[in-house]
Image (cartoon, rainbow, N blue to C red):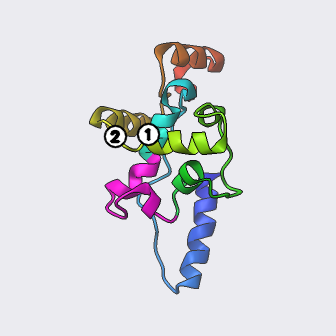
């Protein structure tokens, strides 16, 4: 699905801007995430990608970031609230404040490397109990 969307987008982008070639390097990568333990860490990782790439000093300065939705309450039909996000506060303002506070500290190098590694190999990112339940449900670790 992601490959098909990417191909359609690139064709339209290239036609609009009268260019040729690829827009992105490599293929789409992902991994299953144990939301209870890692969802907010992975969210921070994603929101901080433009910062690490030197495109912005803070996720709030990057136009395409979901940070605007999660930390500032800017409505977008592309984002839906995950139960872990809604558990950050009893009302939208409290959730936004809690989410924003997550960005006061940098992600550890260990978390960054763990997310990158698991995305590269396509394995589940989570507790051993989560991975065991997931692998049992799928019948095999190799089906992820």
Q: Residue at x 34, y 40 (%)?
A: 105
Q: Position of residue 7 (x, y in %)?
A: 59, 65
Near mark 2 (Cα within 10 A), the count class, few <14, some 14-19 or many ≥20, is few
Q: Position of residue 4 (x, y in %)?
A: 63, 58
Q: Please state which of residues 37 and 6 is positioned toward the viewer in this rendering.
A: 37
Q: Please state which of residues 57 and 88 is positioned toward the viewer in this rendering.
A: 88
Q: Residue at x 48, y 30 (%)?
A: 38
Near mark 1 (Cα within 10 A), the count class, few <14, some 14-19 or many ≥20, is some
Q: CA distance from mark 2 to mark 1?
A: 7 Å
Q: Residue at x 47, y 28 (%)?
A: 125
**Residue 51 included in the magenta stretch of the image:** yes
In this figure, which residue is indicated by the disc labeled 2? 105
Q: Please state which of residues 129 and 41 is positioned toward the viewer in this rendering.
A: 41
Q: Which quadrant would the C terminus be assigned to in this image?
A: top right
Vertical arrangement, residue 85 with respect to residue 96, above or below: above
Vertical arrangement, residue 14 with respect to residue 36, above or below: below
Q: Which residues are magenta?
A: 46-63
Q: Position of residue 32 (x, y in %)?
A: 55, 32
Q: Find residue 16 and report its image quarter.
A: bottom right
| Contact, mark 2 vs mark 1 (Cβ under 8 Å) | yes
In this figure, which residue is indicated by the disc labeled 1? 102
């Amino acid at each position: 699905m992601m490959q098909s969307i990417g191909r359609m987008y690139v064709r339209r982008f290239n036609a609009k801007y009268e260019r040729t070639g690829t827009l992105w390097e490599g293929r789409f990568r992902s991994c299953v995430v144990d939301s209870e333990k890692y969802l907010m860490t992975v969210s921070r990782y994603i929101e901080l990608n433009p910062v690490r790439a030197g495109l912005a000093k803070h996720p709030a300065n990057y136009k395409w970031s979901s940070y605007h939705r999660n930390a500032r309450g800017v409505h977008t039909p592309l984002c839906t609230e995950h139960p872990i996000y809604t558990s950050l506060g009893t009302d939208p303002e409290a959730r936004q404040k809690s989410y924003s506070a997550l960005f006061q500290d940098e992600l550890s190098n260990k978390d960054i490397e763990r997310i990158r590694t698991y995305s590269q190999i396509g394995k589940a990112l989570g507790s051993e109990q989560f991975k065991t339940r997931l692998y049992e449900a799928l019948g095999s670790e190799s089906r992820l």
